[in-house]
Amino acid sequence: MQDTLPGGKQFMTQLFTKNNKSGLTRDLIEALFPMFEQASAGAIVVDLDSRITWINASYATLLGVSDPAAVIGKPIRQVIPHTRMPEVVETGRPLLLDIMEHQKQQLVVTRLPFFDDAGAVVGAVAFVLYDDLQPLTPLVSKYRRLHQDLVAARKALAKKSRGTRYSLGDFVGASPAALEVKRRARLAAGRDMPVLILGETGTGKEVLAQAIHSVSGRAERPFVGVNVAAIPENLLEAEFFGVAPGAYTGADRRTREGKFQLANTGTLFLDEVGDMPLALQAKLLRALQEGEIEPLGSNKVVSVDVRVIAATSRNLEAMMAEGSFRSDLYYRLNVLEIPIPPLRDRMPDLGVLCEAILEDICEGLEMRGEITDTAIAALSSYDWPGNIRELRNVLERALTMGEDSGILDSDAIFKVLPRSGNRVQASSIAQPVRPLAQVLAEAESHAIEAALVASRGNRTRAARILGISRSVLYEKLAKMS
């Protein structure tokens, strides 16, 4: 595929030869750039001032630009008002598999910074993807590893005592369910309001909380997490609000700061907030309403400025009904709600999740980790009560017990996959008669989900399996979301 304007392949050469650890030759880069373009709905490059320096024909068509040369040199936000490319240029951080809304459709976008020989950011590139993530997986994984090396070096030099490990790129997935989670997370990041994250254990609630903080206005401030369920009830008040000198026998003679003081001006993440006892719920509510706390054993009120993100795997509405969770605290916490679907409801993401997890497991180890299509199919037969945490455990066990090749096939998966109680099974209970239209709609929905699983999220192949056009598949997916 030829570049619409000069600069595309030259950019890729600069991007991949910057780091000697990449091991990529110019010839390989020349081969990689067409693959990026073929797997994308468009590509665009900007300079240090976020002005467009190159755009390919498919992206120009997507934007409705008849003459690509006419936009060269223009600030990118004049052409794409809601783009986040300036953020990538300013921070030097990539946004992998992010989402962008364009003309009422959600597009998957990967944005990467690029650097000069001295390591300074000099611009960025974006690839807009419609469906086929698989061809880009090795390249995204390669870039992710290189970027993680850079982040690790920066963290070693940083003096921040508390921060985040995760960004939205670490919430992996491009299914409609995953994209909706990311959309709400972006919304939460742009508004300084309480957030309530709901989801089963192992779905990635803390990853999402850290991701929201990392792109919020408080990103340079502390992020303090506390698991309410892991702290004994008699220590919770001291843990949250701190302890004054000599507050009780054996107490430290110095002031001990609580989580609210440590998170002051930043974000406080309350994991498993549904396990909080009623007495502490009242004190937490007052702290949130008044913006002040009173350390244990002190008569002095301390002002705090904290943004709270809470998470729970419990049904708080049911707990309110039975009186074990305060309704006023619930409404204070649940200003913006983000439900994270369980893994069994986002099977199209299984392939890219496995790739990302295996990459993380094998990072720093002298081993490889690859997974076959048959292994993905084997994993999709299980309903994952432990969600992504359990998926990681299964992949780690399969690698440990497998052969030295590091290639996981269906046999390797079935050896470690739990055998009892959690297989996807049809209910034997008689179901009431329902309208035919409803039954057909559900059957169609299940067929689409099965095709997406079989194609590992590739919507083009899924449409081919179903015997429909890609545009028809997009219409049906829009109705399902």
Image (spheres, rainbow, N blue to C red):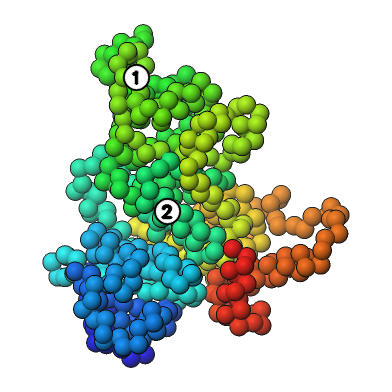
**Which residue sits at x=82%, y=60%?**
434
Amino acid type of disc 2?
Leu
Location of residue 215 in the rendering, given as x and y in whole percent from the top left corner? 33, 52
Residue 330 placement, left or right of 117: right
Q: CA distance from mark 2 to mark 1?
A: 33 Å
Residue in front for this viewpoint, 237 or 336: 336
Location of residue 415 in the rendering, given as x and y in whole percent from the top left corner? 62, 58
Residue 177 placement, left or right of 383: left
Location of residue 184 in the rendering, given as x and y in whole percent from the top left corner? 46, 54
Residue that carries the numbered disc 2 in the rendered image? 187
Location of residue 271 in the rendering, given as x and y in whole percent from the top left corner? 47, 38
Q: Is 81 situated above or below 431?
A: below
Sequence-first disc among 2 and 1 = 2
Count how many numbered circles sit on residues in the image.
Answer: 2
**Which residue sits at x=36%, y=8%?**
249
Q: State the SS at label 2.
A: helix
Amino acid type of disc 1?
Pro
User: Which quarter shows the C terminus?
Assistant: bottom right
> Closer to us: mark 2 or mark 1?
2
Q: State the SS at label 1.
A: loop
Label 1 neighbourhood size at 10 Å, few (<14), some (14-19), many (20+)? many
Outermost residue, left side: 118
Q: Is 117 situated above or below 30?
A: above
Residue that carries the numbered disc 1 in the rendered image? 295
